[in-house]
Image: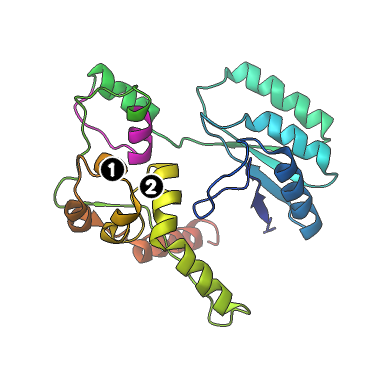
Amino acid sequence: MSIEFIGFISNNNSSETVVRQGPVLDPTHVETVAKAHENAGFDRALLAFHSTSPDALQVAQHVLNTTSRLNVLIAQRPGFTAPTLLARQFAVLDQFSRGRVALHVITGGNAGTLDALNRGEIDMGPVWMDMFYTWQADGKMSPKIKLSLPQPGLPGQPMYYVIPAKAANAALAKKFIDLAESPEVQADGIVKQFNWYPGIDPQFVQSKLAPADWNKLFTDISPSDLAKYGRPFPLSDYFTDIVEGYERVVLK
């Protein structure tokens, strides 16, 4: 089985720990990161899709023009572009790049669920809280709809930082983790920029947020409810099932 090393090219210099300072689409940043991937020997790089971000197809075209060997993995979410048009766009790009294009079809987000809630077609449904708050801020969400974390609780997305026992730069890795988990980064990068709940105890973040930002985040679900009903993801059992399924189906 062959292995591919896949990187990621963002549209600007920002992340969960770095607040964007420049334009939403920074050509110099895209070019620099693309060349860094190629020089480092990556097989391909992912171009992400978001309804409010620059078009991944056009960014990918610029990446392909900037590099000579690097392949691209272009994310697309069904429903935003007519399938026949998307097929034509990919076919043309694939020809111009001489086969360096791959499609990554994603189903992330919950616009359909939020639409159905707004229209009254369903009474409840699982939603991403960051997308809920974004729609609410944009005036796209009915004020009658509220978030709820019901008993006995729901598991969330697991987020872990791991430093290998034999890491060459373990001390630097520890400094990065301390930075990422600092109240300042959690407030500016996680809460303000992404509309997410902080990854650390909210009590340590409250002083770094304006009252309006804090109240918006915890209007429907209080910090105590989040701590009580936000369940850990059963990661060990999940990975065990994956390994057993792989051994049973692939290696049989």
Q: Is residue 99 visible?
A: no
State the residue at coordinates (77%, 59%).
Answer: 40
The label number, if any, that marks residue 191 in the structure image = 2
Please state if 224 lies on the left or on the right of 191 as rendered: left
Residue 130 covered by magenta stretch = yes
What separation in Å lies between label 1 and label 2 (alpha carbons)? 8 Å
Please state if 201 lies on the left or on the right of 76 as rendered: left
Badge 2 density bin: few <14, some 14–19, many ≥20, Cα 10 Å = many
Residue 155 position in % (x across, y down): 28, 53
State the residue at coordinates (24%, 19%).
Answer: 121
Residue 73 covered by magenta stretch = no
The label number, if any, that marks residue 217 in the structure image = 1
Amino acid identity at mark 2 = Val
State the residue at coordinates (63%, 44%).
Answer: 10
Comes first in the chain, label 1 or label 2: 2
Q: In terms of depth relative to the viewer, which is nearer, 56 or 17?
A: 17
Q: Residue furthest left?
A: 151
Residue 170 position in % (x across, y down): 56, 78
Q: Is residue 225 above or below residue 72?
A: below
Region of the chain picked out in magenta, as a range: 122-135
Residue 98 position in % (x across, y down): 84, 35
Q: Secondary structure at mark 1?
A: helix
Amino acid identity at mark 1 = Leu
User: Residue 85, located in which quarter of the rendered image?
Assistant: top right
